[in-house]
Image: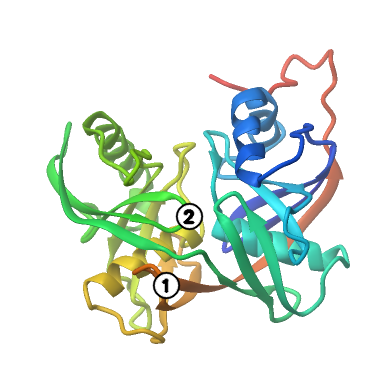
């Protein structure tokens, strides 16, 4: 299996160029569903130790159904196949440029959540125009074991988010274990309470939003991903969901730009325009760097061929 690894703001992406499973043809949403249903062991083995690392997201290149797109891609982490990944799309764009498959300028990428547009500014900098994002509910109360009652917004940015602001725990690197434990408990409570999207889609990410020590930044977030790892980047789909909340509450004007930081201090530049269906069209600018090229080997005699799962 041939792969290229990159990171976006510290968050790793592994692009699978060839050697992945045969998912057939048809809409990417259907192919993603086949990956989720029929190839769980394989996609997890690509990302978990000893082959992978915590927080790594996989990006399986596929043929797009729309010929105007430069590529099709299905994203997954060790916990789930996901509809869209912002940092992954920035990393994928830089990877495609590194391979000579695209050049500076605008390109379309087809994902299971819809077609997104990327603008490659230089070898490392990408502006992503995401799918229309929206806030579903504001100030949704939730009783959480060990924490008590909290409130948060439910929003969609390509994945489903429960966004808590202000964070009940300071968003600092020293607090990452406590932040992780609390957000896992919140997601568990959200699943138990049955809160999520309009059609019952479960919450897959949780965000704690807090002020940043950087006076130029709008804020700093801790984002829990489906595999229970935290996002080292500010999370592209999470930033999109947050923009939808800011717009819905009148706290950010259309076209105004803000800086959003991750818990480790990496940053995205964000803005939005109004969408056609009452939401917002987010733009997310970040930087990615290619780290490695290689081939993954799945030896039959390897006792950890399928990865380490405890």
* Mark 2 neighbour class, 10 Å CA radius: few under 14, some 14 to 19, many 20 or more: many
Q: What colouring does the structure picture have? A: rainbow
Classify mark 1: helix, strand or loop. Answer: loop
Question: Which residue is rendered at x = 35% and y = 64% of the image?
Answer: 242
Q: Which mark is residue 119?
A: none
Q: Quick check: 125 left or right of 154?
A: right
Tell me how far mark 1 sits from mark 2, CA to CA. 16 Å
Query: Which of the 4 quarters of the picture holds residue 31?
Result: top right
**In the depicted structure, whether residue 166 falls above or below residue 191:** below
Q: Position of residue 54 (x, y in %)?
A: 57, 40
Residue 116 position by quadrant: bottom right
- In the image, 198 versus 147, the foreground residue is 198
Given the current orientation, which residue lies at the most extreme left position?
Answer: 149
Q: Position of residue 5 (x, y in %)?
A: 74, 52
**In the displayed structure, does residue 134 sit left or right of residue 189?**
right
- The quarter of the image holding the N terminus is top right
Say what secondary structure mark 2 lies in. Answer: loop
Residue 36 visible in this rendered orientation of the protein = yes
Residue 10 visible to the viewer: no
Q: Is residue 278 above or below residue 184?
A: below
Left or right: 223, with 146 as reference point:
right
Camera-side residue: 40 or 110? 110
Residue 88 spot, x, y in % from top left: 62, 56
The answer to which of 134 and 142 lies nearer the viewer is 134
The residue identified by callout 2 is 158
């Amino acid at each position: 299996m041939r792969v290229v690894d990159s990171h976006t703001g510290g968050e790793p992406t592994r692009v699978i160029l060839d050697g992945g499973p045969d998912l057939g043809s048809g809409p990417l949403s259907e192919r993603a569903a086949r990956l989720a249903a029929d190839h769980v062991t394989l996609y997890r083995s690509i990302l978990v130790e000893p082959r992978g690392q915590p927080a790594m997201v996989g990006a399986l290149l596929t043929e797009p159904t729309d010929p105007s797109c430069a590529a099709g891609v299905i994203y997954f982490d060790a916990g789930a196949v996901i509809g869209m990944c912002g940092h992954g799309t920035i990393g994928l764009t830089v990877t495609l440029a590194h391979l000579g498959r695209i050049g500076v300028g605008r390109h379309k990428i087809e994902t299971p959540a819809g077609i997104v547009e990327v603008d490659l500014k230089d070898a490392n900098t990408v502006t992503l125009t995401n799918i229309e994002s929206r806030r579903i509910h504001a100030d949704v109360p939730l009783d959480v074991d060990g924490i008590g009652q909290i409130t948060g917004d439910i929003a969609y940015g390509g994945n489903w988010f429960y966004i808590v602001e202000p964070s009940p725990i300071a968003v600092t690197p020293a607090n990452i274990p406590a932040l992780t434990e609390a957000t896992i408990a919140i997601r568990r409570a959200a699943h138990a309470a049955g809160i999520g999207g309009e059609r019952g889609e479960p919450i897959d990410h949780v965000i704690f939003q807090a002020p940043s020590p950087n006076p130029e930044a709008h804020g700093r977030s801790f984002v829990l991903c489906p595999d229970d790892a935290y996002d080292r980047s500010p999370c592209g789909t999470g930033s999109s969901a947050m923009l939808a909340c800011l717009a819905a509450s009148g706290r950010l004007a259309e076209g105004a730009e803000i800086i959003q930081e991750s818990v480790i201090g990496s940053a995205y530049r964000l803005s939005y325009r109004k969408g056609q269906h009452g939401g917002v069209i987010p733009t997310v600018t970040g930087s990615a760097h290619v780290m490695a090229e290689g081939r993954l080997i799945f030896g039959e005699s390897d006792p950890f061929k399928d990865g380490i799962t405890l």
